[in-house]
Image (cartoon, grey):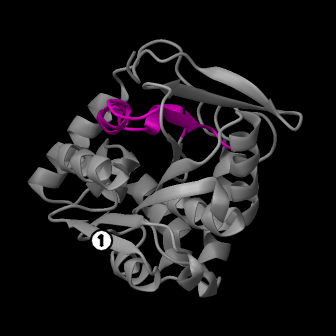
Amino acid sequence: MTFENAPTRSIDVNGTSFVYREFGEKSGVTVLLLHHLTAVLDDWDPRVVDGLAAKHHVIAFDNRGVGGSGGQTQTSVGEMARDAVAFIHALGLGRVDLLGFSLGGFIAQAIVQQEPDLVRKVIIAGAGPAGGEGIVNVGAVLQSAIAKAGSSGKHPKHFLFFSPTSDGQAAADAFLARLNERKEGRDAPVSNETIQAQVAAIQAWGQGDAFGLSAVQHPVLVANGDNDVMVPTINSFELARQLPNAQLSIFPGAGHGGIFQHHAVFVQEALAFLR
C-alpha cells in the first residue's frame, strides 16, 4: 500500500468523527503527521509519506473541522494539540513520534509540552517558537500569494512554499503534480471557516511566549528552507537554539516547503533521526 491508495478511515473522538489514513508496518513507534494551514490529507507529499512508511507505521489525519473531519476548527494551537492528543488516545497508540509541518510544527510543540510522556521524538519543519519573528504576518502573506496566484494562473503554493528561482518553481510544479497522483477517494477541501480559525490560531501563536521550550528534553529535528517567506527561516534557528536536544537542517535554494523540494534528502535525514 502507498499513500496514493491508502483508504481513508474515520474514528469517533469524543463524539466527533476524525478522518485519517495509515500505512506502513504496524511495528515500532507510529509517526503522526501534523499538517499546515489550509491543508487536508491530500496535501501531504506522497514521496515524504511513502519514504517514512518504508520503515515506520505512519498516520496522517485531519484535525477537528479540517477536510473530512467533523466539528469546528479550534482557534488556538493549544486546543488543536489537545484534539490531536485525544485522537492519539482514541486510536489506542502508546508513544508516538511527531512530524509537524508549519502550523503542524506549532501543534507538535504544544503536544510535547502538554503530554511529554506520549512523545518519543519530534520533527518540526517550516515552523518556529511562539512569538517568533514574522509569524503574525502569515495571514497577510497567504492573502498576497492567493492574489498573485489568481493573476498569474499559478497555485498559491508556488509563491508560499518555493523560491521564485527557476529551480524553485520547477520543484513547485513537481510537488503539485505529486499531490494530484491520488485520483480516487480524495479528501474534502478545507472550508473558509477553517482557514479563518487557523489564521487566528497562528496569529495568537505569533504573539505568544516560548518560555516552555527549554524544558523539552525530547530529541528534535528542526528543518526548513533557507528562505522561508511564511515562517521566516530565522525561527528555525531560534527553535534549535531554545530546544536543549535539537539538531538543525537547512535546505539551500528552498523556501517554506524545503522538505518537499528536497524530499529524498529529507526522508534520509528523518529516517536516520527516527532510527
Assess disc 1: are there few (<14), some (14-19) or many (≥20) residues with their C-alpha within 10 Å of its C-alpha. Answer: some
Q: How many marks?
A: 1
Query: Is 146 placed left or right of 79 in the picture?
Result: left
Q: Where on the picture, by quarter, is residue 258?
A: bottom left
Query: Is 56 placed left or right of 168 in the picture?
Result: right
Q: What span is colored magenta in the figure? A: 40-65
Residue at image position (64%, 66%) is 110
Query: Is 154 placed left or right of 231 in the picture?
Result: left
Extreme top residue here?
Answer: 184
Q: Position of residue 57 (x, y in %)?
A: 47, 32
Q: Label 1's element?
A: strand
Q: Is residue 228 magenta?
A: no
Q: Quadrant of the N terminus?
A: top left
Q: Which residue is mark 1?
A: 248
Q: Where on the picture, by quarter, is residue 175?
A: top left
Residue at image position (50%, 67%) is 218
Amino acid type, residue under disc 1 in the picture: Leu
The residue lying toward the viewer, choosing from 31 and 203, is 31
The residue lying toward the viewer, choosing from 86 and 181, is 86
Q: Is residue 53 magenta?
A: yes
Extreme right residue here?
Answer: 15
Q: Position of residue 95 (x, y in %)?
A: 60, 48
Query: Residue 177, relative to residue 181: is it above or below?
Result: below
Looking at the image, can residue 131 be seen?
no
Query: Residue 202, relative to residue 160: is it above or below?
Result: below
The residue lying toward the viewer, choosing from 15 and 40, is 15
